Image: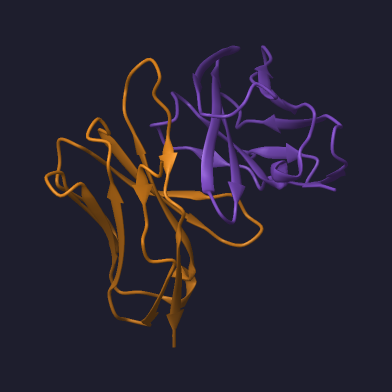
Chain colours: A purple, B orange
Amino acid sequence: KAGVTQTPRYLIKTRGQQVTLSCSPISGHRSVSWYQQTPGQGLQFLFEYFSETQRNKGNFPGRFSGRQFSNSRSEMNVSTLELGDSALYLCASSSRGVADTQYFGPGTRLTVL
Amino acid sequence: DQQVKQNSPSLSVQEGRISILNCDYTNSMFDYFLWYKKYPAEGPTFLISISSIKDKNEDGRFTVFLNKSAKHLSLHIVPSQPGDSAVYFCAAWYTGTASKLTFGTGTRLQVTL
C-alpha cells in the first residue's frame, strides 16, 4: 500500500503571496488532517477533513483553509503569507479520524521570505 | 496556552536501559492520548495510544502509563535501542464538536552506545 504523499516537498514564497499544498492519503482512508510544525510551537493541528467535509478545526486564522476532493485527496491553502508561516506542513490520513492511527506524509517545507 | 506539555526538550539514555518520556496536560476533558515518533525529514509515526478509561497500555518495548489525577502520562521504552533516537511527541484528544488533536512540543531522545 502506498503511503501518504505530499507535494511539493519544498516551497519558497514571499510575503503576501498565497500557496497551495497537496496531500494524497493512503488508499481507502477518508480522513485527512493537516498540521503545522515549527521549532517554537511543535506540532499544531490545523484541520481535519472527512468525506469532503471539514470536521475539526484548530486555532488558526482564516488565511489557512483547505478542501477535500471526492477521491479523498486534500489541498491546503494559505493566503497573504506572513514570515511566521514558515514551517513544515504535514498531512496525515486515517480510516476514521484524528483519534485513529494516523499515517503521516513527509511534509512540505514552506519558507516565506 | 500550552495544554499539552513536554517539559524535557531532550533526554539521553544508554542502550539497553529504560527511556522514560513524560507529558503533562491541563485539560481534564482529554480522553485519548497518543505518542508519535519523528525522525528528521520524515513525518511523525504513530507509536502507541491510551484511552482515559485505562491506566496502562503495552505494545512490545513501548508502554504508556496514564495518571489522570495528576494529568500526567509517560512513555517507557525498554530496552532502549539506538534506532529509538528521534523526537517523541505526545498528543491528546477529546471528543466533542470543537475537538482537535493537541500536541506537545516534543522530547528529543538520544540513545547512546
- How many discs appear? 0
Residue at 84%, 38% in the rendered image: A15
Determine if residue B99 is in view: yes
Locate residue A108: give its quadrant.
Answer: top right
Outermost residue on the left side: it is: B69
Residue at 78%, 46% in the rendered image: A9
Q: Is residue B48 above or below residue B76?
A: above
Locate residue B31: give its quadrant.
Answer: top left
Residue at 68%, 30% in the rendered image: A24
Residue A103 percent across, percent down from the top left: 53, 40
Determine if residue A29 is in view: no
Q: Is residue B64 above or below residue A75?
A: below
Locate residue A49: give its quadrant.
Answer: top right
Residue A51 vs residue A110: left or right? left
Quarter of the image for the N terminus of chain A: give it.
top right
Residue A67 vs residue A102: left or right? right
